[in-house]
């Protein structure tokens, strides 16, 4: 990628841990704020999507929200099924 572009590669398990942390009492980061931050990244790569995605309804909802938001903002999203 050319200079000035941001890339985040994260496993679905780590992503869901970040989302679960937003549900804790003492956090100031909301689920919506985290979703917004993930949509600001120029390229988001979701790794190991096949492992977690098929087992959790909450994971499906969050991934669908990210895909929808990134698509509407014309931001690329790559997925790896390792």
Image (tube, rainbow, N blue to C red):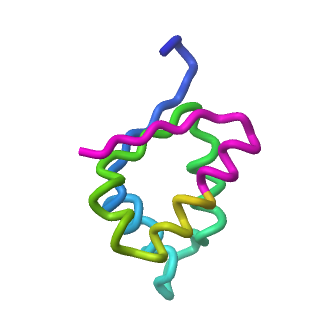
Identify the residue at the far top of this view: 2
**51 left or right of 7?**
left
Q: How many marks?
A: 0
- Hey, which quadrant is residue 64 in on the image? bottom right
Is residue 57 a member of the stretch shown in magenta? no
The picture places residue 62, in percent across and down from the top left corner, at 54, 65
Identify the residue at the far bottom of this view: 25
Q: Residue at x 63, y 42 (%)?
A: 40
**82 left or right of 39?**
left
- Hey, which quadrant is residue 80 in on the image? top left
**Foreground residue, 10 or 29?**
10
Q: Residue at x 47, y 32 (%)?
A: 7
Identify the residue at the far right of this view: 72
Q: Is residue 40 above or below residue 26?
A: above
Q: Which residues are magenta?
A: 66-82
Q: Is residue 22 above or below residue 65?
A: below
Q: Residue at x 38, y 40 (%)?
A: 9
Q: Quadrant of the C terminus?
A: top left
Is residue 70 a member of the stretch shown in magenta? yes
Q: Is residue 23 above or below residue 31?
A: below
The picture places residue 29, in percent across and down from the top left corner, at 57, 69
Q: Residue at x 42, y 42 (%)?
A: 79
The picture places residue 47, in percent across and down from the top left corner, at 33, 46
The picture places residue 21, in percent across and down from the top left corner, at 43, 74
Identify the residue at the far left of this view: 82
């Amino acid at each position: 990628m050319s200079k000035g572009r941001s890339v985040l590669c994260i496993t679905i398990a780590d992503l869901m841990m970040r989302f679960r942390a937003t549900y804790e009492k003492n956090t100031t980061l909301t689920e919506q704020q985290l979703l917004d931050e993930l949509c600001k990244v120029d390229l988001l790569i979701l790794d190991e999507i096949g492992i977690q995605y098929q087992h959790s309804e909450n994971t499906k909802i969050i991934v669908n929200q990210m895909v929808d938001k990134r698509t509407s903002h014309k931001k690329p999203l790559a997925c790896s099924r390792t």
